[in-house]
Image (tube, helix red, strand yellow):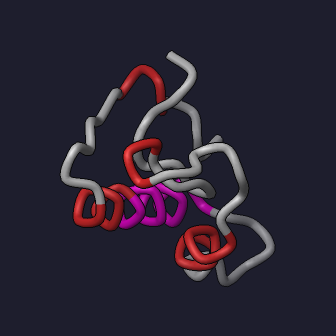
Amino acid sequence: PGEFDGSLSRSDLALGDNHSFNETIWNTVSAHFHHPTISIPTAAKARKDRFEAAKAANKEFTEMEDASRGTTA
């Protein structure tokens, strides 16, 4: 699939524009990054928090593990 919910930098399709960069969403994700090198635990926490925010905003949220795998790589 080309679209999945919980993008680290875009809105979900159910909420409108899922193509354009969303600075507000990215700011909530990048707020986790305080060092030049981002650790795996830090990236995982940023992704988890983004998924939780997306689930709260999008009542149609679907988690597709295979589609989103590697989004923090």
Q: Residue at x 35, y 55 (%)?
A: 51
Q: Residue at x 41, y 54 (%)?
A: 15
Horizontal side, residue 53 vs residue 43: left or right: left
Q: In the shown orientation, is residue 58 left or right of residue 41? A: left
Which SS does the magenta portion mostly show?
helix
What is the x, y in percent for residue 1? Answer: 50, 16
- Above or below — where is 33 with respect to 60? below
Quarter of image, res 60: top left
**Residue at (56% x, 69% y) in the render:** 25
Q: Is residue 10 magenta?
A: no
Q: Residue at x 52, y 55 (%)?
A: 11
Between 72 and 62, the one nearer to me in the picture: 62
Q: Is residue 36 above or below residue 7?
A: below
Residue 34 percent across, percent down from the top left: 66, 83
- Image quadrant where one finds the C terminus: top right
Question: Which residue is most to the top?
Answer: 1
Toward the viewer: 43 or 61?
61
Q: Residue most toward the front? A: 16
Q: Residue 39 or 31: which is nearer the viewer? A: 31
Magenta stretch, residue numbers: 39-50
Image quadrant of residue 49? bottom left
Residue reaching furthest to the right: 36
Question: 18 or 34, which is in the foreground?
Answer: 18
Residue 45 appears at what percent x and percent y? 41, 64
Viewed as shown, does residue 33 lie left or right of 37? Answer: left
User: Residue 41 colored magenta?
Assistant: yes
